[in-house]
């Protein structure tokens, strides 16, 4: 009815989602840094494998216990050297 009154085309937005799903940068984006960097060829496969194989995941003490080693530190240093 509004389309007739205003003489405008009505656009059906049913089924369209708009927005950014990230609600908290610390929890929604930091854990994906290595995966995204690897998928965009910013870091080498060796650096990514070092990170993954040593279970070097960004963790936040209130959610997961930290499992940080020297291998993780080395992978993180290579990551920051390339980004």
Image (tube, rainbow, N blue to C red):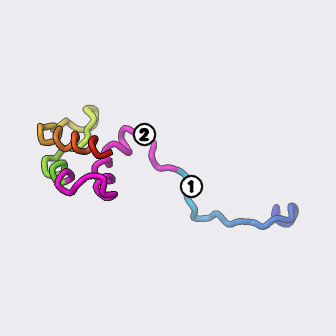
Dots 2, 1 in contact, CB < 8 A: no
Q: Is residue 71 above or below residue 37?
A: above
- Magenta-drawn stretch contains 29: yes
10, 25: nearer the viewer: 25
Q: Residues within 10 Å of mark 2 (few under 14, many from 20)?
A: few
Quarter location, residue 38:
bottom left
SS category of the residue bearing label 1: loop
Give how far across and how far down residue 65 sits, in percent: 20, 36
Quarter location, residue 68:
top left
Give how far across and how far down residue 3 sits, in percent: 81, 64
Q: Distance from label 2 to label 1 (Cα)?
A: 17 Å
Magenta residue span: 20-48
Question: Mark 2 = which residue?
Answer: 24
Rendered-image quadrant of the C terminus: top left
Rendered-image quadrant of the N terminus: bottom right
Name, please, the residue furthest toward the front. 81
Give how far across and how far down residue 39 sits, in percent: 31, 58
- Magenta-drawn stretch contains 21: yes
In-image side of 18 versus 54 (left or right): right
Of helix, strand and loop, which mostly describes the magenta segment?
Answer: helix
25, 62: nearer the viewer: 25
Q: Earlier in the sequence, mark 2 or mark 1?
A: 1
Question: Mark 1 = which residue?
Answer: 18
């Amino acid at each position: 009815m509004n389309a007739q009154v205003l003489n405008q085309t009505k656009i059906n937005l049913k089924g369209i989602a708009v927005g950014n799903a990230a609600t908290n940068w610390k929890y929604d984006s930091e854990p994906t840094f290595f995966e995204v960097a690897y998928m965009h060829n910013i870091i080498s496969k060796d650096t990514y494998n070092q990170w993954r194989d040593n279970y070097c995941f960004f963790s936040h003490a209130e959610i997961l216990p930290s499992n940080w080693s020297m291998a993780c530190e080395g992978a993180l240093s290579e990551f920051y050297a390339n980004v």
